[in-house]
Amino acid sequence: MTEHIIEYVARDRTGITAVITTTGVIDVDTVIHNISSGHSGYVVRAGEWRRAPVRSLSVLGGAYLFANWDGSKRNNLHDVAFQAPTRPARPQGPGGFVAALTTALAIFFGRDRRSA
């Protein structure tokens, strides 16, 4: 049985959608099928030397991936979720939005007077 080490998981509002292993990106449905059939095993690093096995659990809504390395009841697999980079919002002054909109409309309609 092949063992894959999960480095990150990709999530959306519905849950885990893909896992990123040392060998590539794998769809969550494929991972669940591989675990259920015994074709492949998946683990998560739980420290320097420890590894926690990833299991496939079935519930009414379908199956999902679960890993627990700290003994709590929560799914620790969400702890390795990839965090998308965020960018700070740029505050605009009171006339900033109107000026930006006017400039954008002028450029769109071909009446850009900034270059004249």
Image (spheres, rainbow, N blue to C red):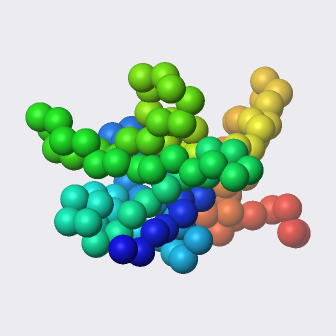
Rendering coords of residue 30 (x, y %): 29, 67
Is residue 12 visible to us here? no
Query: Which residue corresponds to the image point at 17% horizontal and 36% vertical from the top-left?
Result: 59
Q: Residue furthest left?
A: 60
Is residue 66 visible to us here? yes
Residue 109, above or below 58: below
Residue 96, above or below 10: above
Indicate left or right for 62 with 16 as reference: left
Q: Nearer the viewer, residue 41 or 64?
A: 41
Rendering coords of residue 55 (x, y %): 34, 48
Indicate left or right for 57 with 52 as reference: left
Rendering coords of residue 28 (x, y %): 34, 59
> Looking at the rendering, in which quadrant would you find the N terminus?
bottom left
Query: Which residue corresponds to the image point at 86% horizontal and 69% vertical from the top-left?
Result: 115
Q: Nearer the viewer, residue 69 or 14?
A: 69
Query: Which residue corresponds to the image point at 80% horizontal and 31% vertical from the top-left?
Result: 91
